[in-house]
Image: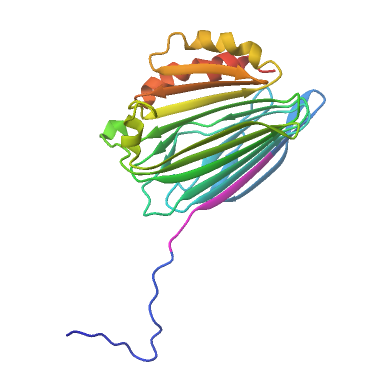
Amino acid sequence: MMSAASWPSEAPRSAPVRQRSQGSVRVTAAASGGRTHLEGLAESGSLRARMPRVSDGVEAVLVNTAGGVACGDYFSISAEAGEGARLTLATPAAEKVYRSDGAVSRIDVHLTAQAGAVLHWLPQETILFDEARLARSYLVELAPDARFLSFEAVVCGRAARGEAMAGGLVSDQWRVRRGGELVYADAFRLAGPISSLLARPAIARGAAAFATCLYVAPDAESRLEEARDLLAGATCEAGASAWNGLLVVRWLAADIETLRRDARHAPRVGLLSRTS
């Protein structure tokens, strides 16, 4: 039998504390004299906002200086477009979510658009590595006449490296309120053998990349045929529907290249260029 002893003066050793990335950004934009200006910016941790010069409105490019999202990281993003203001939030590159040892990384997003404001949420795609674990929540609060456009894309695995997302967790929870009333609720969650689940015909029929474009505005329903026309040449599965002042477009693709090609026109050229 083997045993180990330590000197009485030695404190018991504890497991090393893991380093977790945390960060938050809050951006506010206001309008005066027919122009939009940056009213406030607060940053902390490894999340930063860069403000490029644009001719119309305010654009905030969100940068994760940690280089990605790993097990147990937490990020908070808050943005508000004041009355009559135009605010766009974007990212400079795809966000990578790395393999986790079990801890779930969380991202909370809170977006607000006051009367007559235009708010765009247009990040690059999120790439989930095998065994990544990510939970995101989105709360969007809009005035009755505000306009909101979002485009979110998710890729499970890294096809270029031959890596499927055999396991992990991905959860996206969306809530949109207009005039204080809940008008859109969308919950997406996959846990466990992700690639096997995506292979099921009732879930994704083998697609590993998917995206959603959401447009909330007084004219959203009238744009349905325009959106469907933009989807006419898509090589992946895609569809659009509109109701109650909302327009939703979804894509399912085998890989990110197909998704980018088929989805690029709807949010960034068609709807985006004409929201005003």
Residue 20 on the magenta span: yes
* Quarter occupied by residue 102: bottom left
Q: Residue furthest right?
A: 33
Residue 78, percent from left and from top? 64, 42
Q: Residue furthest front?
A: 202
> Is 152 located above or below residue 220 in the figure?
below
Q: Main secondary structure of the magenta part?
A: strand
**Residue 82 appears left or right of 165:** right
What residue is at 75 percent from the left and 23 percent from the top? 145
Residue 243 on the magenta span: no
Residue 181, percent from left and from top? 72, 33
* Quarter occupied by residue 29: top right
Q: Quadrant of the C terminus?
A: top right
Q: Name the foreground residue: 224 vs 243.
A: 243
Q: Name the foreground residue: 246 vs 136.
A: 246
> Is residue 272 in sight in this rendering?
no
Q: Residue furthest bottom?
A: 8
What residue is at 55 percent from the left and 13 percent from the top? 227
Residues in magenta?
18-27
What residue is at 38 percent from the left and 86 percent from the top? 10
> Is 22 located above or below residue 230 in the figure?
below
**Residue 6 appears left or right of 42:** left
